[in-house]
Amino acid sequence: MNQKETGMNEEQKMERMRALAAALNAASAAYYGGLDEIMTDYEWDAGFDELARLEAETGVILPESPTHRVSAPGEEAGGEKEAHEYPALSLAKTKSVAELAAWAGEREAWLSWKLDGLTLVLTYDGGSLTRILTRGDGAVGTNITYMKEVIGGFPLTIPETGHLVVRGEAVISYPDFEEINASLEEGEEAYANPRNLASGTLALDAKHLSEVRARRVGFYAFTLVHTDREMVSWGRRMDWLAEMGFAVVDREAVTAETLGEAVSRWTETVETGGMPLPVDGLVLVYDDTVYAEGGSVTGHHATRAGLAFKWADQPETTVLDHVEWSCGASVITPVAVFDPVKLEGTTVSRASLVNLSEMDRLGIGENRKTVMEVIKANKIIPKVIRVKEREGTYDIPSVCPVCGEKAEVFVSRTGTRLLKCAGPDCPAKHLKKFQRFVSKHGMDIDGLSIEGLRDFVAAGLIRDFSDLFRLEEHRESIVLLPGFGQKSADHLIAAVERARRDVDPVRFLNALCIPQIGPDAAKRLIAAYGWPGFLDRLRAGEDFAQVDGIGGERAGAIREWFGKENNRAVFLELLTLLEVRNVTPRNAGGGACEGKTFVITGEVRIFTNRDAFKAYVESQGGRVAGSVSKKTDFLVNNDATSGSSKNRKAAELGIPILTEEEFIRDFGGAAPA
């Protein structure tokens, strides 16, 4: 996309313009439509700039030119198309701080993030949210008001009865993006970037609202388009939105003189990983909104609405050392390992190649014979953007790097060539089970995110649940994994050690991922039999169908799970590694907390954690509530004399306040350390 237009005749320039427009539009349609990325941002920007230069030279703008359209063709969602009340125009952009300063001139201005998501326009009337539109082509968007309950970052009602129009960006954070990609089920394609995922999410229809909610899309207001109030200052408008409950973009007041230092500081925040939201630049706006609205419209840009600053990517040339194949939840992903290069102040030697189609598109060749250019996309993600020299081709592995089963090439619904493991029991396909096992409602192993679990599985450190309690044997290997160092490895191993002690049997049963046996069913089983009573009956082959709330279907699921040799072997191995707490059956003569309701607040010092405290109360026939009321029998707070709201409420109602020591004295439980 970097062909020089110098020396072209008019016909060649027109041909080049048509080719550029077609390629850019196809890439944008994929990008905005939540499909596989077919062109890097770096390539798209270079092609866009070349097209704009050719248009300036020829004086011709093609009808399909992306330089004069706000959004990509094909941006779709499940709602109806509707006209915007105020055109949602895009911003002109620059890569020069000097141009930013010149644009600011002598006027007060604000610097904020250019979030990399989907622009949404929210309308409020009479204090209620009445409409959400996507930006669409700037004149017409798609109504997705049906998603108002499942997108975060804005209130459904506001203390303002007039007409309000708010524009902002819907994004998915990098941590959430990584978690969602890591937990995909077998056969699901990984998303290329958070923007791609957000786009695909907001294109879902009303039947998939639970999926939208699960992806944690957040809205961040970046301008107040209209208010009936007299409020000229952009900065004051943003403060006002925040006061009403909107999530608002970070912002800083600047002048032409202070702009350079501010841009450097904000850029450093991105480079050092201090920005969890996807951004692709910065935005400069005037504080005087009346002045800003008085500009003209050139193409699809409002000249005074703001100026976007995009970082100039600095590609570095390196040589491919080898391709590493990493099996995730759904596919085997190729990762380029290359000679280390400095990018944005850090040394980089790895970058995901995404899938086989992307490797083909780039032209990846043999190891040590592939010379390529890499960048840090948006200052964060290492990315291979171009192969400069190639000889031969890459080798596709025939077996999965995790389990050794056959690796197969398949074509996804979008035509992408992917590599997947054919082994049904590959640990990499069961990351959600590992995630549940280590969660707070499972074994509560702090410091193991789903991304960390994926890396542990890919490195061969975890194949079943019992391996989690042998991680100390792999301390040296853990230190070398992404995101880990000596300190975090020590923290994780200490967390594993804590998790193996005084294990709540309810959380243990839930952690095993037995189909249909979640926290509620586990509580019922332990309440009925206690521990090791449940274990004794399991060994005796007892049918659990008679337990209240279990029934034949759940009892059958238990029999089937423990009937599988692999499951039974892991379970027995775990029993040798864990110290499961003895619990008396609730139904055996009534527990110490029978019929009483407790509220637990403040720091827990004797019980392992709040969940362990709650589990004990419930095992003894009691109930734990979240707030103090007339139905509360005891409030447990180690700071019994504090002026907290729960302490005050308990005092008003005459409810006794106990410390943990006093609770244990009266009701039993964990012995004080």
Image (spheres, grey):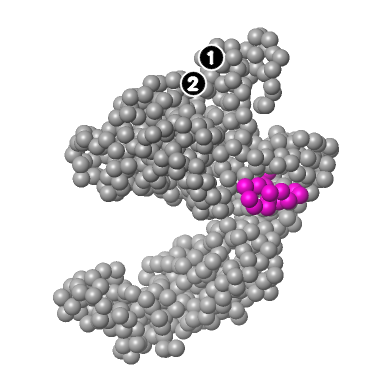
> How far is the residue under mark 1 from the one under mark 2?
8 Å
Label 1 crowding class (10 Å Cα cut-off): few <14, some 14-19, many 20+?
Answer: some
Q: Quadrant of residue 364?
A: top right
Residue drawn at (54%, 53%) of the image? 273
Chain part drawn in magenta: 338-353
Residue 320 point in image, percent of width and height = 77, 45
The image shows residue 242, relative to residue 138, as above or below, that is below
Label 2 crowding class (10 Å Cα cut-off): few <14, some 14-19, many 20+?
Answer: some
What residue would you read off at disc 2? 68
Amino acid found under the numbered disc labelled 2? His
Precedes in sequence: disc 1 or disc 2: 1
Q: Quadrant of residue 471?
A: bottom right
For residue 499, say whether it is visible: yes
Q: Quadrant of the N terminus?
A: top right
The image shows residue 574, relative to residue 520, as above or below, that is below
- What is the tally of numbered marks visible in this picture? 2
Residue drawn at (16%, 79%) of the image? 654
What residue would you read off at disc 1? 61
318 with respect to 418 (left or right) = right
Residue 14 point in image, percent of width and height = 62, 12
The image shows residue 539, relative to residue 332, as above or below, that is below
Give the main secondary structure, helix, strand or loop, of the magenta stretch. Answer: strand
Nearest to the observer: residue 537 or residue 531: 531
Nearest to the observer: residue 659 or residue 343: 343
Residue 443 point in image, percent of width and height = 51, 71
529 with respect to 13 (left or right) = left
Nearest to the observer: residue 30 or residue 249: 249
Amino acid found under the numbered disc labelled 1? Ile
For residue 171, say whether it is visible: no
**Residue 342 lies within the magenta run:** yes
Residue drawn at (69%, 13%) of the image? 8
Q: Secondary structure at mark 1?
A: loop
